Amino acid sequence: MPRLLDDRSTTPFNQEEHELFLRTITTLKTSRLRLPGSDNIDSGDLVDFFNHLVLINDIECLESPTWINWDITNRCNCSCIHCASDALLDPDNTGTDEISTEAALEFIDEMANAKVLTVVLSGGEPFLRQDIYTIIENIKQRGLFLTILTNASLPLDIERLERLLDPDTDLIQISLDGNDATSHDSQRNAPIFQDVVSNLQRLLATTVPVKTNMVITHHNIDKVYEVFHFARTMRIPVISFTVNCPVGRGETVPLPDNARLLRISMNLQLLSEDYPEIKIRNNVLLVPYAQPEIRDQIQPDTTNHFPRVRCLAGTAKAVVDSKGDLYPCPFMLYPAFNAGNVYENGLHSLWNHPETWKELRTGRNLETTKCNECGYLNRCRGECPGAAYGTHKTIHAPDSRCTYMPEGDRS
């Protein structure tokens, strides 16, 4: 087992730690974080490619989204402290869903006809729906890629899932926020840990593709490495680590310190090197250019040419909530971004309406913010517009999680 850094330390890196830092930021899958000379391709390159298409063709979005996060219920048997959807607690599964089976199947046909590539079933808790396997089956019959986000605490028909899901294109992502009942259940506000472990064990004995995800909050940040080793002993092939986003219930959850998150990212790098059989999705570093160690590796650019598209929210990706309302992103579930109801007006009509997310698609204006003085704006592009809106109630503001103050804006 590698000797991990003290992630609470604030002392400068020694030579060994600096080398680890360089390895870490070379492999991080954070937005637009690339060093000069890096050959790695990540999601930031896809954003660049889409930006290029938009700029040279003078278009604001694709003709239809390629990825849809579909909240098929707003009910959940948990009440997680960080829930972005602010789901309704329904532990006994006695409530009803806003969308019928018939309407759900019609929407699957509409997504397939619109050439949507990937559907993410979310909620609430998807497996509270009595018709969940009918929905899954129809999604797969229409040839769509499928990811299911679940807390995995309810009874699962494992054999049916194995028959329906393609291990090459589909995925079940299971929330794992602690390595024991105390740490996991206290963040989820429900006594579910043993049921989650039981379902994980059963799924791992099949061909069903499984990944676990830990949402790091102030509540469980001390459990990151224990969660990794717990998942490793269970032989979970892919483990992802993310950080709470300040939306929904997460608006009131304190954010971890960026300097500590950097050292946690470095420790995850160490663990990935020591246990190469486990794939770690390291999405811990929130706003990378806020960190002085990262800025030291990159020459600032003061030209600040700012392409209008920052991310794929509302340009290639979308969310349909449990009522059927269309939003650009899971982190932008605010009334200002409600484009209308897809069950009433149709996905294609709403997506291509000239007023849909016009401000977002035209682009953020950061000229009056600290970003305009920042030499890293061309790389970070102001980071997440959802996080900016959550705090400032406008997308024309920096990501609220950025603590960096450029020299020219310190007055």
Image (cartoon, rainbow, N blue to C red):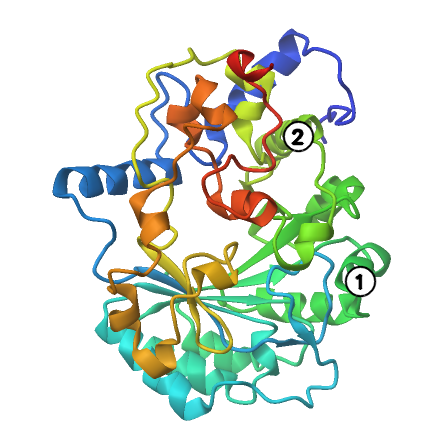
Q: Which residue is mark 2?
A: 258
Q: Is residue 231 visible?
A: no
User: Which residue is situated farthest in the left direction here?
Assistant: 57
Q: Is residue 351 above or below residue 235?
A: below
Q: Residue at x 24, y 60 (%)?
A: 354
- In the image, what residue type sits under mark 2? Asn
User: What residue is at 37 percent from the left and 30 percent from the top?
Assistant: 40
- Quadrant location of the C terminus in the rendered image: top right
Residue 126, above or below 369: below
Give whichever of 320, 160 is nearer the camera.
320
Q: Which of 312/207 is in front?
A: 312
Callout 1: SS: helix
Mark 1 or mark 2, earlier in chain: 1
Please state which amino acid type lies under the numbered disc 1: Asp
Q: Quadrant of residue 153?
A: bottom right
Contact? badges 1 and 2 (CB < 8 Å): no
Give the left or right position of residue 104, taking residue 122 as reference: left
Rate crowding at label 1 as few (under 14), some (14 to 19) or many (20 or more) other CA atoms within 10 Å.
Answer: many
Viewer-proximal residue among 97 and 270: 97
Q: Is residue 382 visible?
A: yes
Residue that carries the numbered disc 1 in the rendered image:
185
The reply, left or right, for residue 185 in relation to residue 142 is right
Q: Residue drawn 39% across and 61% down?
A: 318
- Tell me where residue 325 appears, x and y as whole percent: 44, 72
Image coords of residue 227 (percent x, y): 72, 48
- Viewer-nearest of labels 1 and 2? 2
- Residue count near mark 2 (Cα–Cα under 10 Å), binned few <14, some 14–19, many ≥20: some
- Tell me how far mark 1 sits from mark 2, CA to CA: 25 Å
Give the percent coordinates (x, y) of residue 383.
47, 36
Figure check: 291 above or below 366? above
Q: Secondary structure at mark 2?
A: helix
